[in-house]
Amino acid sequence: MPESTPTSADWRAWFATYGARLLLVARQWTRSATDAEDVVQEAFVRYWRQQRELPGDPLPLLITSVRRAALDLIRRSARRERREQVHVDLHAESWFEPNPEGDERANLLEEAVVQLPSEQREVLVLKIWGGLTFAEIAEQLDLSPNTAASRYRYALGGLRSRLSTLEENHG
């Protein structure tokens, strides 16, 4: 992505290019695809109104905004759930777009990602689907870059192990 801030004339093209990535990042913190879409929309509108004139690549700013909007949603939801005492399954919906051919490997991957510890899953999603560097991830999560990198390595190792086990069980 060029080091320029999108203008009102090209925001649709920019969002078409990066919207799916932001949606996958939002899924890290949300319970459903619908919540993730709401979070991305809220974050993008916030960015567009208040931060689009800032210099540099807007993607890290948007990812920060997505994370904050998701955490705000989590807090609101937790308060509401305590009031209503409703249980919601965190993994009821697919993170990835459904594959018309029923790609078993994609299903196994999604299952393996969901089984990772949340700290590792968070770093994995920000690195792979968010496209952030370890320094940017560290800033997002208030960690050292080395901790972010080691959580990523552990996540990859965990995925390999879980995928192997899942493939044996499904194969």
Image (cartoon, rainbow, N blue to C red):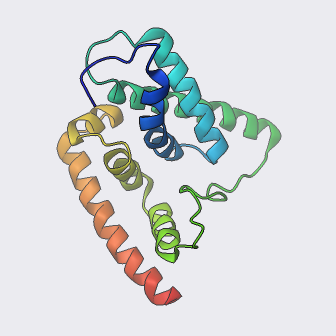
Horizontally, residue 167 falls left or right of residue 100, namely: left
The spot of residue 96 in percent (x, y) is: 53, 57
- Provide residue 165's location: percent of width, then percent of height: 42, 83
Of the pair 11 and 145, the residue shown nearer to us:
11
Q: Residue furthest right?
A: 84
- Quadrant hosting residue 63: top left
Label tally: 0
Q: Is residue 12 above or below residue 153?
A: above
- Along the horizontal axis of the image, is 93 left or right of 147? right
Residue at 58%, 43% in the rendered image: 30
Q: Where is residue 75 drawn, in percent x and y?
A: 61, 32
Front-lying residue, 1 or 145: 1
Q: Is residue 26 above or below residue 124?
A: above
Give the quarter of the image for residue 52.
top left
Query: Is residue 18 shown left or right of residue 170?
Result: left
Q: Residue at x 67, y 59 (%)?
A: 92
- Seen from the viewer's position, the closer of residues 6 and 169 is 6
Q: Residue at x 42, y 36 (%)?
A: 17
Q: Residue at x 31, y 43 (%)?
A: 131
Q: Answer above or below: position of 56 versus 155.
A: above
x and y, in percent, of residue 143 in the image: 27, 38
Left or right, 92 with respect to 102, comes to right
| Quadrant (top left, top right, bottom left, bottom right) of the N terminus | top left
